[in-house]
Image: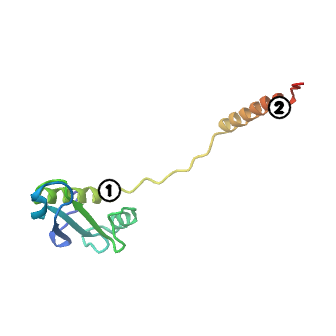
Amino acid sequence: MNAGITIPESELVERFVRSSGPGGQNVNKVATAVELRFDVAHSAVLPEAVRERLLARRDRRMTLDGVLVISAQRFRTQERNREDARERLAVFVAAGLHAPTPRVPTKPSRAAKKRRLDDKKQRSGVKKTRATKDWD
C-alpha cells in the first residue's frame, strides 16, 4: 500500500450491496456499492505503534471491536467503488503512519507579563476615573 505496508487480500472482507439514492432501474437491480472491512485490531501486517494510533482515533467508521468499515457508493460501477474503498483505506492507514509531534509547553516572557500587568493597571485607572466623576 504505502511506506512498506501492504495489506494482503486475506485481511480484507468485501461485501457488495445495492446503492441508495437516485439511479433509476439500475440501482434496484445491481449491487454496485462496496462495504470494505479491515480488522485493524487483529491485523498481522500493521506495526504495533501504527495499530495503536489508528485504534485511538475517534473515527465513526471504526467498530468497538476495532474493525474499520468503509462504505463506497459514489460511482455507478462496482469496480470503481471497489477502487474508491481501497484508496480510502490507504489514506486511513497513512494517517496512522506518522507519529504526532509532542507539544512543547511554553511560558510567557518576562516582558510579556510586564506588558499585561501594565495594560491592566492602565485599564484599571481609566475605570477609576469614571467612577469618581460627579454627575450632579
Q: Quadrant of residue 9?
A: bottom left
Residue at x 24%, y 60% (from the top left corner) = 89
What percent of the width, then of the height, locates residue 26? 9, 58
Give SS at disc 2: helix
Q: Is residue 75 left or right of residue 133?
A: left
Instruction: Report the number of numbered marks.
Output: 2
Identify the residue position indicated by label 2 in the image: 128
Specify the amino acid type for callout 1.
Answer: Ala
Classed neighbour count for the residue bearing mark 2: other residues with Cα under 10 Å, few (<14), some (14–19), many (≥20): few
On screen, 101 above or below 122?
below
What percent of the width, then of the height, locates residue 98? 34, 55
Q: Is residue 29 left or right of residue 118?
A: left
Specify the amino acid type for callout 2.
Answer: Lys
Residue at x 41%, y 55% (from the top left corner) = 100
- Numbered tag placed on residue 95 in the rendering: 1
What percent of the width, then of the height, locates residue 50? 33, 64
On screen, 44 above or below 23?
below
Q: Is residue 33 left or right of residue 39?
A: left
Q: Nearer the viewer, mark 2 or mark 1?
A: 2
Earlier sequence position, callout 2 versus callout 1: 1
Q: Quadrant of residue 67?
A: bottom left
Residue at x 40%, y 65% (from the top left corner) = 56
Q: Could you tell me if residue 1 is visible in this image?
A: no
Give SS at disc 1: helix
